[in-house]
Amino acid sequence: MGLMNGSNNDADVKLLGAWPSPFVLRTRIALNLKHVAYEYLEEEDTLNSESVLNYNPVHKHIPILIHGNKSIRESLNIVMYIDETWLSGPPILPSDSFDRAVARFWDVYVDEHCFTSINGVAVAKDEEERKAAIANLEQCMALLEKTFQECSKGRGFFGGDNIGFIDIGFGSMLGPLKVLERFTSVHFIHPESTPGFFHWVDRFYAHEAVKPVMPDIEKLVELAKLKFNTSIFK
């Protein structure tokens, strides 16, 4: 179950998800941030789930937010829907239209480049592919470090004094990133190369909307050992 502090909308809220998914994590953090009461439904076999096929027949994957008789799909889309629907917590997207566009841009960048590079290291067929994916990921971290310095304006989060859209978008990737660091012995977030990020990570993990739903790293490591050919990470 999610945080049960209520909301300004009385319709039932359910979330179809799976605990290892960084995309599901985004939606859980957003719901917690807005103090929305919701029922979390773990889908262990999403490929054969009748609920997933029923509520998301186009892409057939999680997360899926069910609000009353409506289903909302795709993690960033769901986070924006949560922000627009519930006013019971801090805003997730900035009020300024340009700042909103910047936040959306960087979350798309995280998905298209950072997460793709994380996955690229995990599925690399040889050392050359692995090194290329690691280089791409290091470039992502450098760009996001610069973005953090610009967006935070010296405060604790990308969103300023509280978690915002970029924090949720990238913060959901910390689990897979830490698993990758464990296998590769490469520190993608380091106090010298990414000083803003390095201190941001602790603040993000400690936030009340994040701490209850962040996946256990050891469980993620064990899952990765089963899912990927980890011999290439030596």
Image (cartoon, rainbow, N blue to C red):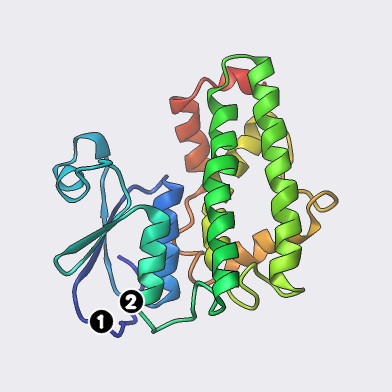
The percent position of residue 158, horizontal first and vertical second, equals 64, 67
Label 1, on which residue? 9
Q: Residue at x 74, y 73 (%)?
A: 153
Q: Quadrant of residue 184?
A: top right
Q: Which amino acid, mark 1?
A: Asn
Point out the tag, 2 or 1, that comes first from the N-terminus.
Answer: 1
Q: Quadrant of residue 117?
A: top right
Residue 225, placed above or below residue 147 = above
Q: Could you tell me if the residues under marks 2 and 1 are in contact, i.e. CB atoms within 8 Å?
A: yes
Q: Nearer the viewer, residue 210 or 195?
A: 195
| Residue 23 appears left or right of 48 | right
Q: Locate the N terminus by quadrant.
A: bottom left
The percent position of residue 198, horizontal first and vertical second, equals 74, 56
Say what secondary structure mark 1 lies in: loop
Residue 208, placed above or below residue 54 = below
Badge 1 density bin: few <14, some 14–19, many ≥20, Cα 10 Å: some
Q: Nearer the viewer, residue 30 or 96?
A: 96
Q: Residue at x 75, y 48 (%)?
A: 142
The percent position of residue 67, horizontal first and vertical second, equals 22, 68
Q: Which amino acid, mark 2?
A: Thr
Residue farthest right in this picture: 192
- How many labels sit on residues? 2
Residue 229 visible in rendering: yes
Q: Which mark is residue 85?
A: 2
Q: Locate the C terminus by quadrant.
A: top right
